[in-house]
Image (spheres, rainbow, N blue to C red):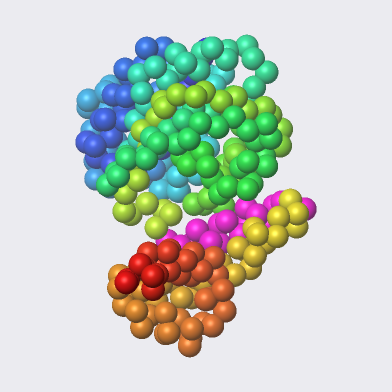
Amino acid sequence: MKISVVIPTFNRGAAIAATLDSVLNQTHAPLEIIVVDDGSTDGTADFIAAHYGNKVRLIRQQNSGVARARNRGLRESRGEWIAFCDHDDRFHPQKFERFSAFDGEDVGVIVPRWREVGAQIHESPSVAPRNAFSWLFGWHNPIVSMSVPLVKREVMLHIGGFDPRCAPADDWDLWLRLARVTKFAWVDEILVDYSLHDGQQRDDPARMFRAVRRVLGKHPFELARRPLLLWWLLFSGAFVPSIGAYKRFQNGENRAIFDAMRAHPLSILSPQWLSLGARILLRQPTRNNRR
């Protein structure tokens, strides 16, 4: 199994070493490791060149966004399979060895389980859905990170790679388009550590909503068959103007909900406000419990 690893990076500095080392320590060595430096200004590229030399192919480009950086790595790759890895994630040593069991199989995407590491540790559940598209469409990006799967290069090129217009939901968009044209295989083993921290692209709810709306808009017939998703799409748009009040309410400022109701009344019907309200109600003791 010939695997090209593609790592897009921007201003990661010396911290990228943990990611690179996790790839270099694979029990099944990859064909190549491509690092696309997306216009870093902190010396990231120089650090990689000085400490890893010919162990990696270093490509430097002007800052264009992670989707375009991944597409650049895809075009430059020579392997049959592509393993993308975000610059703050880590592969478990046996990841590629476990994937090699599928070499020659009629599949285009191989998905293992993953572990989220950050303030808390969370492990993904065991899954093996029969219909990958329905699973992906019904649950917003359950694969969670580009660092998780292995994708066949020719299939990626066939669908045109990443759509930068869908960032930061471009990975979810990619899974949906892949599920239309190829088979998915599942590995019931945690093989990736995915880092969740402040400052990631998903921390901008307004931008994320616009991206999700664009992705869903590519599948109107599927959306029409799922009224809950349609409701989410309609009322999440109303939620966006109330994000400031929502965060204040989360931080204990109770009057923020009344500010939201007054300024953006439809926002209270959004799934975000309703789910927050439900969680608060479930935490409240009942009258019988108070006695």
**Residue 232 sits in quarter:** bottom right
Question: Looking at the image, which residue is at 41% across and 12% down?
Answer: 28
Residue 44 is left or right of residue 183, and the answer is left
Magenta region, main secondary structure? helix
Horizontal and vertical percent for residue 79? 52, 19
Asked whether the viewer can see residue 126, the reply is yes
Identify which residue, 228 or 14, lies in the foreground: 228
Q: Is residue 2 magenta?
A: no
Horizontal and vertical percent for residue 206? 48, 65
**Residue 109 sits in quarter:** top right
Horizontal and vertical percent for residue 145? 46, 39
Identify which residue, 48 or 181, lies in the foreground: 181
Residue 8 lies, with reference to residue 24, above or below; the image says below
Image quarter in which the C terminus is found: bottom left
Residue 31 lies, with reference to residue 91, above or below; the image says above
Asked whether the viewer can see residue 147, the reply is no
Question: Looking at the image, which residue is at 34% across and 79% down?
Answer: 254
Residue 65 lies, with reference to residue 21, above or below; the image says below
- Labels in figure, total: 0
Q: Is residue 208 magenta?
A: yes
* Region rendered in magenta: 204-221
Horizontal and vertical percent for residue 139? 58, 47
Question: Looking at the image, which residue is at 43% across and 54% down?
Answer: 202
Residue 53 is left or right of residue 222, and the answer is left
